[in-house]
Image: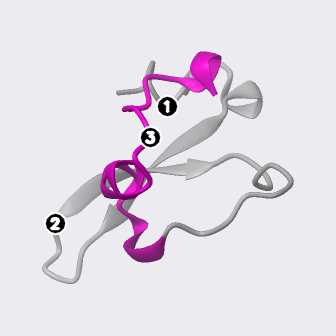
Amino acid sequence: MDRYEEFDPAAPETSWYLRETLTLTNGKPVSVYRMNGAPPDGAVPIPGGDFRAWLMAQNLPEFSGRGEA
């Protein structure tokens, strides 16, 4: 997953996303990815936060990395 999110644990300052551990209300730790810095100009929130569902609703192809963006 780190590779997909372009996270390099050896160089987090240059990574596209950062991996963090959060604790759920039930006490279980989970890993999450958070964008490292501000979103690109023109970026808009995805309703519900489900990127894959949003792509499908927009009739866009599955995303496989920024190289295709």
Does residue 61 belong to the magenta stretch? Answer: yes
| Quadrant hosting residue 27 | bottom left
Circles 1 and 3 in contact, beta carbons < 8 Å: no
> Relative to residue 26, is residue 6 drawn left or right?
right
Residue at screen point 16% across, 66% down: 28
The image's mark for residue 26 is none
| CA distance separating discs 1 and 3 | 19 Å
Q: Secondary structure at mark 1?
A: loop
| Quadrant hosting residue 64 | top left
Most extreme residue toward the right is: 41
Badge 2 crowding class, 10 Å Cα cut-off, few under 14, some 14 to 19, many 20 or more, is: few
Vertically, is 37 above or below 11? below
Residue 49, image x and y in percent?
41, 67
Residue at screen point 46% across, 75% down: 47
- The mark that comes first in sequence, 1 or 3, is 1
> Relative to residue 25, is residue 47 drawn left or right?
right
* Residue beneath disc 2: 28
Q: Secondary structure at mark 3?
A: loop
Q: Quadrant of the N terminus?
A: top left
Circles 3 and 2 in contact, beta carbons < 8 Å: no
Residue 54, image x and y in percent?
40, 58
Q: Nearer the viewer, mark 1 or mark 3?
A: 3
Q: Nearer the viewer, mark 3 or mark 2?
A: 3
Q: Quadrant of the C terminus?
A: top right
Which residue range is magenta in the image?
A: 47-69
Q: Could you tell me the amino acid type at mark 2?
A: Lys
Q: Could you tell me the amino acid type at mark 3?
A: Leu
Residue at screen point 24% across, 74% down: 24
The image's mark for residue 60 is 3
* Residue beneath disc 1: 5
Q: Could you tell me the amino acid type at mark 1?
A: Glu
Residue 56, image x and y in percent?
33, 49
